[in-house]
Image (tube, rainbow, N blue to C red):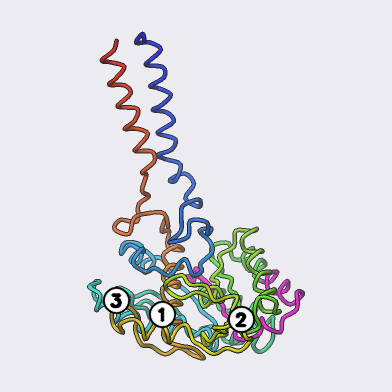
Amino acid sequence: MSLKPALKILSLFVVFSLICLNASVLFPGNAAQGTNSSTPWNIIDHSSTDISKIPESAVRQAKSDLHIGYGHTSHGSQLTTGMDGLVEFMNGQGYPEDLYAYNDGGEDGALDLRDRCFPGAADLGNPDRTSWADATRDYLDDHPELNVVIWSWCGQVSSASEEDIDTYLTLMDDLESEYPDVDFVYMTGHLDGSGLDGNLHLRNEQIRDYCVENEKILYDFADIETYDPDNTYFGDKIPDDNCDYDSNGDGERDSNWAIEWQEEHTEGEDWYSCASAHSQPLNANQKAYAAWWLWATLGGWNQGGSAETGEETPGFGIAVVLAATVIAGAIWRRR
């Protein structure tokens, strides 16, 4: 083989390898997320609950950049009570002291999360299905530094019609248009035991489909409480918000996946005790892990990065470069 054609082939290999190497940097939205590479970056669900995958740098970046307003009632408090307990739990896991701290205003380097900060509405369905939108506008107009808004349902998705959810989605979209510098986080409703054929599941699917099709940011509350930390699925066992499920298919909930998992694992090492409205501590643990995955993502974390650095791991591109180097060496020896 002559040298000139070989160099042409080699140059093509190098160009191709550089494209592969940089594709994930140019298109970070296509990066793998957590334990489920098929989950889009903007969907925070049960595959977003491995907190060990979030690099410390991403946590600190979120704490530095985000100013969050969170509206909720009792079910939505699972996020914040889970986050309360997470601080000491992670301190005991060898992480920097109070790395996962939050408070209203972000004092002492904590995450700025303003809990129940919207006068005029309690959650997405209280006092009605629309007041939360005007309450959001009022707060944003008075607090222009806020750059993340997240609202939770209580039980209102269970009784919602398709038109009710369309109203919710439209109001969210309107807010996004009016406040383009603010990230608005969509949410599904908590489980209610009605199963895959129930109205809750249908309406949650309506929210999910909209968020996937329109690249909206979704915190999938219901999906998170459908799986245990071992990725065991309970959605086809009529689970409810307390993590109760039907273990033998007789139509009656007779077991509790959270209690079972807690009893099989060590408190303080594998899970931690915390308040968890209407549910079990493990459920609030999972909600807190996913919440920090959300904050890190909104802070700019590339979810396909390594846990140590948060940088994209360009394994395939490096492999192609190495292959090109080997081929070049072989050609040089044969010329």
Kind of residue sitting beneath label 1: Asn
Q: Verify CB contact (< 8 Å) between mark 1 and mark 3.
A: no
x, y percent for residue 50: 39, 68
Asked whether 161 falls inside the magenta stretch, the response is yes
Kind of residue sitting beneath label 2: Ala
x, y percent for residue 90: 29, 76
> For residue 99, what is the image quadrant?
bottom left
Q: Earlier in the sequence, mark 2 or mark 3?
A: 3
Indicate left or right for 297 with 234 as reference: left
Range of magenta residues: 144-171
Q: For marks 1 and 3, give the CA distance.
A: 11 Å
Instruction: Using a 10 Å C-alpha cutoff, classify the residue at mark 3 as few (fewer than 14 neighbours), some (14 to 19) or many (20 or more).
Output: some
Instruction: Using a 10 Å C-alpha cutoff, classify the residue at mark 2 as few (fewer than 14 neighbours), some (14 to 19) or many (20 or more).
Output: some
Q: Which residue is mark 3?
A: 90
Q: Nearer the viewer, residue 304 or 320?
A: 320
The structure residue drawn at horizontal position 33% and vertical position 81%, both measured from the top left corner, is 265
Q: For marks 2 and 3, give the CA distance.
A: 34 Å
Q: Earlier in the sequence, mark 1 or mark 2?
A: 2
Q: Nearer the viewer, residue 312 or 253?
A: 253
Q: Nearer the viewer, residue 264 or 64?
A: 264
Q: For marks 1 and 2, give the CA distance.
A: 29 Å
The structure residue drawn at horizontal position 40% and vertical position 34%, both measured from the top left corner, is 18
Q: Which residue is mark 1?
A: 285
Under circle 1, the secondary element is helix
Kind of residue sitting beneath label 3: Met
Q: Nearer the viewer, residue 149 or 163?
A: 163
Under circle 3, the secondary element is helix
Indicate left or right for 323 with 244 as reference: left
Residue 135 is marked as 2
* Residue 263 higher or lower than 180, as above or below: below
Instruction: Using a 10 Å C-alpha cutoff, classify the residue at mark 1 as few (fewer than 14 neighbours), some (14 to 19) or many (20 or more).
Output: many
Which quadrant is the C terminus positioned in?
top left
